[in-house]
């Protein structure tokens, strides 16, 4: 995505126009497979709806299509204006926010492993943000860069010969 959207190669709507037929072919071939298989071959959950059910839910399906299109355009715009890594970080932050909402508002419980992994994800996002904002601080390593950027360490040190003169 970022290759197609970088620079002036493709704008967001052109990208969606290029990618949508490929998605349609993949999903259409899977739908064709479901039609050709005997009913219930893959389980009751993958049974195709009747024409009456499709007609009943047509407004919801149309709204879902419009929302999916808007989401694809917004994703393409985000990647074009930032980077693919920023898009991944937005997804990670969205997941963290969903878990925090479920814990705080819905009083769901999470395991210690989930706490550790989400903490590591938050730490990775913070370190990446620090690295992007002050790359010169990270020339001597990751830990030194984080400490220098946060103002905990003294930053660049003078050589021993220069300090004694």
Image (tube, rainbow, N blue to C red):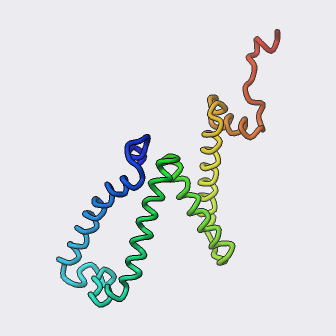
Residue at 76% x, 34% y is 153
- Quarter assignment of residue 54: bottom left
* Image position of 33 (left or right of 104): left
Q: Position of residue 102 (x, y in %)?
A: 62, 73
* Image position of 141 (left or right of 48): right
Q: Nearer the viewer, residue 49 or 41?
A: 49
* Residue extending furthest toward the top: 165
* Residue extending furthest toward the right: 165
Q: Position of residue 55 (x, y in %)?
A: 32, 87
Residue 118, placed above or below residue 103: above
Residue at 68% x, 34% y is 144
How many numbered badges does the structure rendering display? Answer: 0
Residue 132, placed above or below residue 106: above
Quarter of the image where the C terminus is located: top right
- Quarter assignment of residue 51: bottom left
- Quarter assignment of residue 150: top right
* Image position of 43 (left or right of 1): left
Residue 159, placed above or below residue 156: above
Residue at 62% x, 39% y is 131
Q: Nearer the viewer, residue 130 or 20?
A: 20
Q: Position of residue 50 (x, y in %)?
A: 27, 88
Residue at 62% x, 34% y is 135
* Residue extending furthest toward the bottom: 52
* Image position of 81 (left or right of 55): right
């Amino acid at each position: 995505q970022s290759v197609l959207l970088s620079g002036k190669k493709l704008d967001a709507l052109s990208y969606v126009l290029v990618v949508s037929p490929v998605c349609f072919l993949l999903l259409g071939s899977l739908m064709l497979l479901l039609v050709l298989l005997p009913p219930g071959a893959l389980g009751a959950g993958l049974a195709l709806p009747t024409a009456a059910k499709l007609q009943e839910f047509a407004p919801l399906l149309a709204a879902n299509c419009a929302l999916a299109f808007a989401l694809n355009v917004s994703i393409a715009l985000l990647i074009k204006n930032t980077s693919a890594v920023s898009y991944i970080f937005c997804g990670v932050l969205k997941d963290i926010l969903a878990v925090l909402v479920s814990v705080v508002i819905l009083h769901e419980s999470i395991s210690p492993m989930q706490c550790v992994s989400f903490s590591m994800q938050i730490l990775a996002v913070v370190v990446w943000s620090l690295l992007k904002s002050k790359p010169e601080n990270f020339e001597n390593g990751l830990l030194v860069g984080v400490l220098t950027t946060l103002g905990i360490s003294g930053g660049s040190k003078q050589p021993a010969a220069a300090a004694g003169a």
